Image (spheres, rainbow, N blue to C red):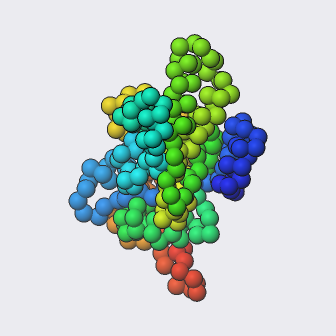
Amino acid sequence: MLEQKEYVNIFQRLGTQAAEKYRMDNAPNKIYKFISFYDKGNPAVNRRNIETLNEGKVWASKYFSLNDPYEFNAMYLDEEKIVKSGKDIETFQEYWKQIANSFLTVSFCAENDILPLNNMPMWAYYGNNHHGICVEYIVNNPICLHPVSYEPERNPMTVVLGNFVSLALDAVNGKIPGNNPELLQYQFLILNLMCLKHKSWRQENEYRILFPCTRFSENGKRISLKEIGLEINAIYVGKDCSDRNKKKLKDVTANLKVDLYKMKINEESTNFDLSFDAI
């Protein structure tokens, strides 16, 4: 299991390559995504979700479509340092906007002290109060999969952003190679700035896919699971999922050749557990 402090320590002591090896070597074998389905209303959402699953894809969004107002904004710009650099804060804000808009994001959760299928807040927030589903994915290639770090305060980013932009422009203009070690170091820091959230979100134990997006006007799109190194292993329907949606999901799992399960309260456990039966 990846330890966030160790991940940062390895980067600081041994550099980008060692830290990235640690990230990928310690990536979870399975990750989970909760998806809302509706018993009444929102037929377009249900239809879109069914189509996305059937196609072996997942929906990826721009940062501003996510439910945390501090998404991609868990860092701040030091105006005093910007003034000393001879630039203005609007320039740095535009730098960050351009970088942030060049990625699409998909959020998942991984196992920790609470198994994802027993995570009641996740079923409530993202699984439409147990009317939705939880999809279990096997991680075949974790190259795009990044752990989210939970912090009590925002981090400064002025120096990191300024140096990254300067080096990136040098690479574009052919002054340095694209694999320049210093550029890769700042690229690592930028990607990790995109994976910072306030500690109040810690129970989600999030891992996220950061997927390059070349069309800035694109607010989101379906991306192939193969492209991001994932495959669906099973689908779990919430304990209150409608019979109509269960039937549609049964067709999906038959098409994908994976198992479908129905969640239920574990009446025999002393813990607040859910169990499941095959459908």
Q: In this view, does 199 lie above or below 79?
A: below
- Residue 11 falls in image quadrant: top right
Q: Which residue lies furthest to the left in this view?
A: 41
Task: Residue 162: give x, y in percent of width and height.
Answer: 51, 32
- Residue 90 falls in image quadrant: top left
- Please give the name of the residue rendered at 56% of the width and 44% of the height, measured from the top-left corner: 192
Q: Residue furthest right?
A: 14
Task: Residue 249: give x, y in percent of width and height.
Answer: 41, 56
Answer left or right for 93 relative to 277.
left
Q: Can residue 54 be seen in this view?
A: no
Task: Residue 1: give x, y in percent of width and height.
Answer: 70, 57
- Please give the name of the residue rendered at 62% of the width and 65% of the height, measured from the top-left corner: 112
Task: Residue 161: give x, y in percent of width and height.
Answer: 51, 35
Q: Nearer the viewer, residue 260 or 24?
A: 24
**Count of numbered labels shown in the rendering:** 0
- Please give the name of the residue rendered at 71% of the width and 53% of the height, measured from the top-left corner: 6
Q: In this view, does 144 lie above or below 244?
A: above
